[in-house]
Amino acid sequence: MLTSALAALVVATAAPRPFTVDDLVALPRVGAPELSPDGARVAFTVGRLDRAGDKISSALYVVPAAGGVRRQLTDRDERISSPRFSPDGKRLAFVSTRGGAPQAHVVDLASGEIRPVSDLPGGVSELLWAPDGASLLVTADVDPRCGADAACAARAEDEAKGKPRLATRLLFRHWNEWRERLRTHVLRVPLDGGAPADLTPGDRDAPPAVRGGVDDLAVSPDGKTLYFTSVADPLEAASTNADVFAVPLAGGEARRVTSGPGWDASPRPSPDGSRIAWLSQARGGYESDRFRVMVAGTDGKDARDLTAGTELSASDLHWARGGAALRFAALTSGYHELYEVDVRSGKIAKLAGTPALGGRPRVNVQSVSYSADGTRAAALVDGISAPPEVAVLEGAPGKARWAERTRLAADALAGVARPMLRPLEAISKDGTKVFGWIVLPAGHRDGERHPAAVLVHGGPQGAWNDAWTSRWNAMLYAARGYAVVLPNPRGSTGYGQAYVDAVSRDWGGKPYEDLMALVDAAIALGTVDGERMCAAGASYGGYMVHWLNGQTDRFRCLVSHAGIFDLEAFFYRTEELWFPEWEFGGTPFEQPGDYQKFSPSRFVQRWHTPTLVSVGELDYRTGVDQGYAAFTALQRRGIPSKLLAFPDEGHWVSKPKNARVFYDVVLGWLDEHIGPAANLSAKAR
């Protein structure tokens, strides 16, 4: 029998093994870091696959911010989210499914005692504390006729059961759920057992169910005023005009604070309560405009843009230095990083210096939480081959350092081979420099060419960053022996707003040319076998896959998940109408030009490439019929093709059992067409 020391030596010296789908699905999922008000502790959740391998259960932990042993606070079969420290730091509120519907719970950190504090018919989504610690503010879906009246809500639910749905407005459904009679409201839930109160009553979402959340809520330091975001336009499905409102926490009429034409959100009252900061998009109708950091008096007048003259698009806003500065996150060239802007001078400084973490010059951060005074931050840090872990940032701007406080996912991947990540640049057809990444299999040697998986991101205003993702995980493709090309063509975020804007009204134009230029650049590096390539993507990426089929024969196979096939039909099928109206210059019945010009359905006669089509039958964003139509076109053309349909998924494939099937089918499709066996077959022919 091996001694423990010898066994450890064997493990340490064993050759790294390839990353597998089972590894991906079983990884601990570290999430939702929350820093205590004094900055001394970090709360976070960890999701783990259950023994049956069918679902994820999660537990709540706390760990000293300075480092130390983590403490587990829950151990049930439940899903936990939104941990929030009480103002005095002695309790943690969180949302749990332990009783069925998600409800608010509170744990006493000294005793470990947990008690439920909400019992709302539809459950709650997110929460925050009132400043006095005597109540929670929760977001919940309610019938606007009932508000916080539980008896009324129960009657309304009973009346609706078994009856046909009746909609009288758009946005009656969203992503994968029907919302024809529900609105998201903010409810104040007293911890002494008193009746909840609806603070944002009426037939509108406040905060918005579509783009909003707990970040769109804040309470004034004196505890008297709730700030929230809402869309007042009557046709919400075609509007991105959200504004910040204020309402007395005791209840009453709401007043409008902001009045810009775009999305005004994330209100943040200053520590002394005399000012308010928020994030604002200048252009109405455009969901991907740059978010500016604005500051004004609490009436919203004489607002100043603190990020004017920069390309930074801000998120995760928080006051610091006693109200002298604001901190925020922004994406630049593949990394979300933290910045601080001086309120008086407008001077902006990056917070983290180099090396950022583990010798890496830059580190990607997400889900940022701050101490009450803004001097310490906690966040999830990750990379393209490094799943998220909790880390803490300390230090002055430019000198601050990240320090990891968990290594749960990292330990689970001990012994797994990691791929190589390299930046990729190219000059597009019109002379514009474009960007991306290439991920090479572990053990790649100079001069070695690999078959390539070209993955096209969604959005189109999105990006491949040096960040972890479970949806299109580059490590899985690299572990299979593929070079993974991750193009960031025009439309991608993190390279300036003009770069983002360039995709609108040109979906199949310059972005297609950019993508092909980046593919050529990868081939020119000597790492990609240009004769063995497959392109894959979802949403806009799925659209581009269908577009590629009608424009080029350079790929041996294609994979489209939730892809758009017919743009005009997409407009009438999707829920967020502001998106196609901006992207294609209006509605198809008023401005049909771009819908027709860039619709893949117009080029089916040119299709030749074998294609795998994947859909979620609950997808209300792109619509399952788009996938069915593309598969019909492929079959009718006699092109080798497959249809993979998930009855219980929406726009994403999120359930563990379905993720296994998705990756098995997709990777099998690539292996069939560009893998070693496919190459031998081609040589034999």
Image (tube, grey):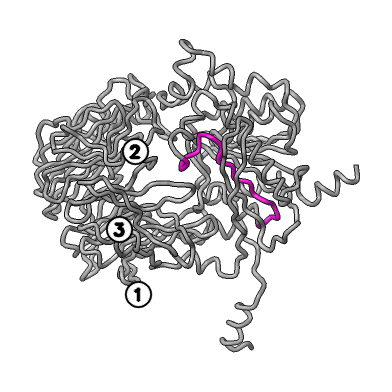
Q: Which residue is mark 3?
A: 34
**Who comes first in sequence, dot 3 or dot 2?**
3
Q: Which residue is mark 2?
A: 309
**Which quarter of the rendered picture does the C terminus lie within?**
top right
- The residue lying at 15 percent from left, 53 percent from top is 191
Quarter of the image holding residue 284? top left
Q: Which residue is mark 1?
A: 69
Locate residue 558, reporting x and y percent.
Answer: 68, 37
Locate residue 168, reporting x and y percent.
Answer: 33, 19
Q: Mark 3: which secondary structure?
A: strand
- The residue lying at 67 percent from left, 43 percent from top is 521
Q: Mark 2: which secondary structure?
A: loop
- The residue lying at 59 percent from left, 51 percent from top is 474
Q: Mark 1: which secondary structure?
A: loop
Q: Indicate whether 4 appears above or below 404.
A: below
Q: Amino acid at mark 3?
A: Glu
Residue 587 appearing in the image: yes
Q: Residues within 10 Å of mark 2 (few under 14, many from 20)?
A: few
Q: Indicate whether 20 appears above or below 178.
A: below
The magenta region covers: 479-495
